[in-house]
Image (cartoon, grey):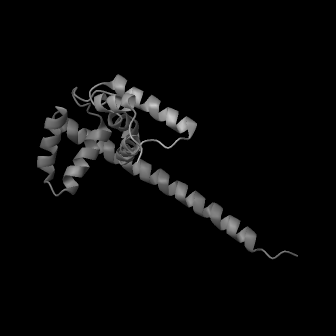
Amino acid sequence: MKFLPPDLEAAMDLSKSDPNQAAEVLRIAAKYLKSQERMPNALAYYLADAFERAMRRASVARGSELLINLHLVVTHRRTVANFENVGFDLEQFIQSKMPKGQAILRICEKYDISESTVKRMLKKYQAFKASEAESDSLLFEALQRDYALQSAASKKPNK
């Protein structure tokens, strides 16, 4: 177990309330990575947790979520209502067995938007997810065709 240097400990303690201290934590982490030295467990956990939580979000929301998880942006401001956040949160409420009407009202309160805006953003989010799924399936088909061609080429008998 590696103990935290005092400057890192202070920066990590203040990082949740001060984006400049969060940036200092990342500068210290960069030094460990560049020198290929084993970083303290608390710092490794801080980075890994931020990456893991951000990568669970929709692909278009990952960058902003990573900034939030690394405490590089202040989150005490009004939550930005974009279709990815609204759609993702609404999906989470519905998956937790909350009635759709109640989920919509909760989203209205959370983002300070109207019901019609929530419904419009939900349609946009669903269209986005459908197009993302379609592009993923096309990519998968192309990879399968390429693999099949490579397999067939390697099975030809050599003369």
Question: Is 119 placed left or right of 156 in the picture?
Answer: left
Residue 139 image point, x, y percent: 54, 54
**Residue farthest to the right?**
159
Where is residue 155 drawn, in percent x and y? 74, 74
The quarter of the picture where residue 76 lies is top left
Q: How many marks?
A: 0
User: Is 109 located above or below residue 90 in the figure?
Assistant: above
Residue 125 image offset from top left, x and y in percent: 32, 44
Eyeballing the image, is 81 above or below 58? above
Rendered residue at 52%/38% (across/down): 33
Residue 75, image quadrant: top left
Residue in the image at 62% along x and 63% along y: 145
Q: Nearer the viewer, residue 6 or 145?
A: 6
155 vs 38, nearest the viewer: 38
Say if 52 sits above or below 82 in the image: below
Is 73 left or right of 140, judged from the image as shown?
Answer: left
Looking at the image, which residue is at 71% across and 70% down? 152
The image shows residue 151 at horizontal and vertical percentages of 68, 69
> Where is residue 34, by image quadrant?
top right
Tell me the quarter of the image containing the C terminus.
Answer: bottom right
